[in-house]
Amino acid sequence: MDIEACRKFCKALPAATEDIKWDHDLVFSVGGKMFFVIGLDSPHRFSFKVADGDFEEMSTLDGFIPAPYMARAKWVSTETPSRVKQKDREKYIRESYELVKAKLTKKARATLGI
């Protein structure tokens, strides 16, 4: 999996920021709220938020698990990131971004211009 492709896609989303957290995770946020995390260590597992109603199904799909420490917030993680097609990964990122953006206050969205 190509971290740079993920980075480019995430950074193209309006008001998205990037940051390194926990010494080895590249984190993308909107309005200070995380929407995508990718490990810098191989095999570059990644995690993202899913809709509440999709969490149970998504976290039991082959190759996905409830995200450690973030499952309570309805995040899932990949066990085998190489099996996720780029098109699907981008769809998951965009959906996560939209979920997180929707939870921002009107004032925060206005400040960010989104």
Image (cartoon, rainbow, N blue to C red):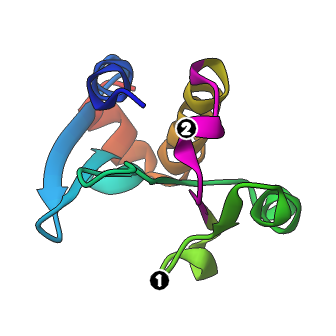
The residue under the point 56% across, 25% down is: 90
The amino acid pointed to by label 1 is Tyr
Task: Say what secondary structure mark 2 lies in.
Answer: helix
Q: CA distance from mark 2 to mark 1?
A: 22 Å
Q: From the viewer's perspective, is the residue at label 2 or at label 1 nearer?
A: 2
- Judged left or right of residue 106, residue 80 is right
Residue 93, how many percent across, how many down?
A: 53, 35
Q: Which residue is mark 1?
A: 69
Image quadrant where residue 53 sits: bottom right
Residue 17, how many percent across, how many down?
A: 21, 38
Bounds of the magenta span? 76-86
Q: Is residue 97 above or below residue 21?
A: above
Frontmost residue, 94 versus 86: 86
The residue under the point 35% across, 45% down is: 107
Please tell me how many numbered marks the rendered image carries.
Answer: 2
Residue 109, how many percent across, how many down?
A: 38, 38
Q: Which residue is mark 2?
A: 82
Task: Say what secondary structure mark 1 lies in.
Answer: loop
User: Callout 2: 10 Å neighbours few (<14), some, many (20+)?
Assistant: some
The amino acid pointed to by label 2 is Ser
State yes or no: residue 96 in magenta.
no
Q: Is residue 33 above or below residue 10?
A: below
Q: Quadrant of the C terminus?
A: top left
